[in-house]
Amino acid sequence: MTTASADIRRHTFFEDAQAILGGTLLIALGVNFFTQVGLLSGGTAGLAFLAQYATPLTFGQAFFLINLPFYWLAIRRIGWAFTIKTFIAVFCVSFFSDITPLFISLSDIHPLYAGGAGGLLMGVGFLMLFRHNASLGGLNILARYLSETRGISIGKFQMAVDSIVLFLSLFIVDPWLIVISILGAVALNFILTVNHKPGRYLVQP
């Protein structure tokens, strides 16, 4: 890789900042779509949704707390830059998710629209974070660690976690809303599958 290519590929501080701000705002809006009608998602966010529905915690509070144990793994296995960006992204999603209802009212939204549009919003937000070497941490970090140190498939681990979240949700969420939540997950992952292709937008040496 030439020096010129490396300079083209590197994001500036401002570019990273606007991506984290914009991405987390979109994710927080999608979270509020889900929360308003009682939907959930997989992974760490799914655990935060369950905690929100079953305890006095808000989504933001639960999401921030659940992520705390995973940062030391991120520092050890991925590095400080990724960890700092991820911590900021998690904090922003937690904060924005809790304050969004102060600025907009979602008292009348159909569950199907909430699932589809909310999933798309979160997918675009995740895409912005991934493009700038950030994530929402949590179980994704653990999955990467187990893959590198124990040879456990990331896909299988994520599937196992999502299955646990789905099982626990049966005791808290209406089954019809679980079906719509799956629609939201499909919408989110569709955005990532189609648009997140590492290397496609990089200048080749």
Image (tube, helix red, strand yellow):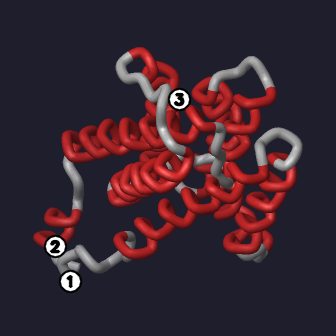
Residue underneath mark 2? 5
Q: Position of residue 109 (x, y in %)?
A: 48, 37
Residue underneath mark 3? 94
Q: Earlier in the sequence, mark 1 or mark 2?
A: 2
Residue underneath mark 1? 204
Comparing 73 with 14, the one in front is 14
Q: Residue at x 18, y 77 (%)?
A: 203
Classify residue 101 as left or right of residue 37: left
Indicate the secondary structure of the residue bearing disc 2.
Answer: helix
Q: Are marks 1 and 2 in contact (CB under 8 Å)?
A: yes
Q: Residue 163 bears which disc, if any?
A: none
Q: Residue at x 70, y 36 (%)?
A: 66
Tell which tag, 3 or 2, sits nearer the viewer.
3
Distance from Cα at disc 1 to Cα at disc 2: 7 Å
Considering only vertical position in the picture, is 120 above or below 58? Answer: below
Tell which tag, 3 or 1, sits nearer the viewer.
3
Residue furthest out toward the left: 4
Q: Residue at x 49, y 60 (%)?
A: 188
Classify residue 134 as left or right of residue 174: left
Q: Is residue 134 visible?
A: no
Indicate the secondary structure of the residue bearing disc 3.
Answer: helix
Residue type, numbered disc 3: Ser
Residue type, numbered disc 1: Gln
Which quadrant is the C terminus positioned in?
A: bottom left
Q: How many residues crowd around disc 2 within 10 Å: few (fewer than 14), some, or many (20 or more)?
A: few
